[in-house]
Image (cartoon, grey):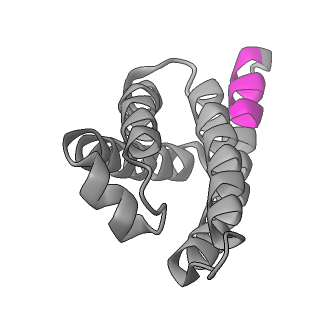
Amino acid sequence: MTRRRADELANVVGFVTLGFGVLLTAMPRRSAAALGLGDRPVLAGAVGLTDLVVGSGVLRGRPRWPWMAARAALNLALTGCYAAEANRPGGNRRARTGAIAMASLTVVDATLALALATQRGNEDAGLER
């Protein structure tokens, strides 16, 4: 992946993360229900605040790869939250879908973090042009 492409993808991730952060922070109860997290507005609000910090870091932090890695870690934790919600009595289809989506995003974000870190290492070594 080229440096330019990695930066473009990181920008998209940063803006999407900020958008979710605003929604989750401003409307935690409605967001939790809509996203399949059940009646967990405190969790939604906490994730929203974290998204605001991580999204800002992805957009403005240098180097960017630690922020992408932090987002991957947050997504992994959310995968567990969704899985727990899906396994409650009665099952929650949205939560099952959320668990799959968050697990997939974890892989995408970790891959992008690795690409950004590799490119950063290449630049530090004078290999990237």
x and y percentages locating residue 121 in the rendered image = 77, 24
In the rendered view, would you say 126 is above or below 110?
Answer: above
Residue at the front extreme, as displayed: 89
Is residue 120 on the magenta stretch?
yes
Is residue 25 visible to us here? yes
Across the whole image, how many numbered discs are drawn on residues?
0
Looking at the image, which residue is at 36% across and 65% down?
Answer: 33
Looking at the image, which residue is at 67% across and 69% down?
Answer: 88
Q: Along the line of sight, which residue is nearer the eye, 72 or 81?
A: 81
Q: Quadrant of the C terminus?
A: top right
Looking at the image, which residue is at 43% across and 33% down?
Answer: 46
Q: Is residue 20 left or right of residue 106?
A: left
x and y percentages locating residue 54 in the rendered image = 47, 30
Q: Is residue 12 left or right of residue 85?
A: left
Looking at the image, which residue is at 41% across and 38% down?
Answer: 42
Identify the magenta region. 117-124
Residue at the left extreme, as displayed: 26
Is residue 1 visible to us here? no
Q: Along the line of sight, which residue is nearer the eye, 107 or 50?
A: 50
Q: Quadrant of the N terminus?
A: bottom right
Residue 47 location, quadrant: top left
Q: Along the line of sight, which residue is nearer the eye, 23 or 84?
A: 84
Give the main secondary structure, helix, strand or loop, of the magenta stretch: helix
x and y percentages locating residue 61 in the rendered image = 46, 20
Q: Is residue 126 left or right of residue 109?
A: right
